[in-house]
Amino acid sequence: MTPTRRSLILGVGAATLVSPFPLLAAGGGSRTFTVYRDGSEMGTHRIDVRPGADGAAEVDIDIQLQVKILGITAYRYSMRNREVWKGGRLVSMDSETDDDGDADFSRVRQVGDELEIEGSMFSGRVPGDTVSTTYWSMDFLKRGIWINTQTGVPIEVTTAAIGPGEIGGPNGPIATERWTAKGEKLDVILHYAGGEWLSVEFTAGGEPAVYAPQSVAPAFAPVWTASL
């Protein structure tokens, strides 16, 4: 996904931090985030990461967002995306987006040592180690090109660790590692704990937005490792 992100993260003061690790279960499964914009609930992002056939990792994403003004829906956003990963590389991606009535798509296939992209705003080939803007594996932070999952546009990305942070978790605040990821039309702060993606901050329509996990289980990192 790449609308844009930041809000609710720092309101936990000096409360005792809760470790997410006892809740993390191997084998993959679903994690749902509540998306907040300027402190108000905007919708949800559900990601399902599971072991697939022949040692692959299979990822399904469903994003449903809306902005209301005086009780009237002023904006809607919907994305459904399916990805297959193996050997640390993207094998395929099929994404469809309704961005407030505008249709976008991104279809990616592995072709030899490259990825062939057919998207609503880009068609062509990129290196085979290119990743997507789905954030779910920390290994993505080591890659220099990310595919915009909405439009298929490849983005040259620079990432950097910016120190510790914390997010509001289902059982209290969680200590995280914060990373920036920046490129053309991409400027986010990503939160990870124990190798797990737990939040993203961004800007949405000029307002700060943030993901808050409804749970921190299950663990996605073991599924990634098993697919290598």
Image: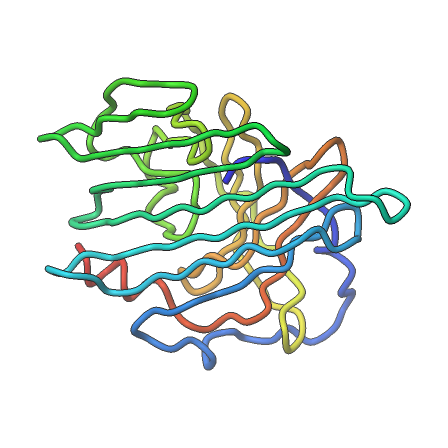
* Rendering coords of residue 132 (x, y %): 37, 38
Looking at the image, residue 112 sits to the left or right of residue 130; the answer is left
What colouring style does the render use? rainbow
- Considering depth in this image, is 13 or 196 the residue closer to the camera? 196
**Residue at 80% across, 45% down:** 68
* Rendering coords of residue 33 (x, y %): 58, 60
Q: Is residue 140 above or below residue 182?
A: below
- Considering depth in this image, is 214 or 192 the residue closer to the camera? 214
Counting the numbered discs, the total is 0
Task: Give the residue at the far right of this rendering.
Answer: 70
- Considering depth in this image, is 38 or 167 the residue closer to the camera? 38
Q: Kindly indicate the quadrant of the structure image that contains residue 53.
A: bottom left
Q: Kindly indicate the quadrant of the structure image that contains residue 120.
A: top left
**Residue at 41% across, 31% down:** 105
For the C terminus, the image quarter is bottom left
Looking at the image, residue 8 sits to the left or right of residue 214; the answer is right
Q: Is residue 135 above or below residue 132?
A: below
**Residue at 48% across, 53% down:** 62
Q: Is residue 214 above or below residue 114?
A: below
Looking at the image, residue 62 sits to the left or right of residue 132; the answer is right
* Rendering coords of residue 107 (x, y %): 31, 33
* Rendering coords of residue 51 (x, y %): 24, 65
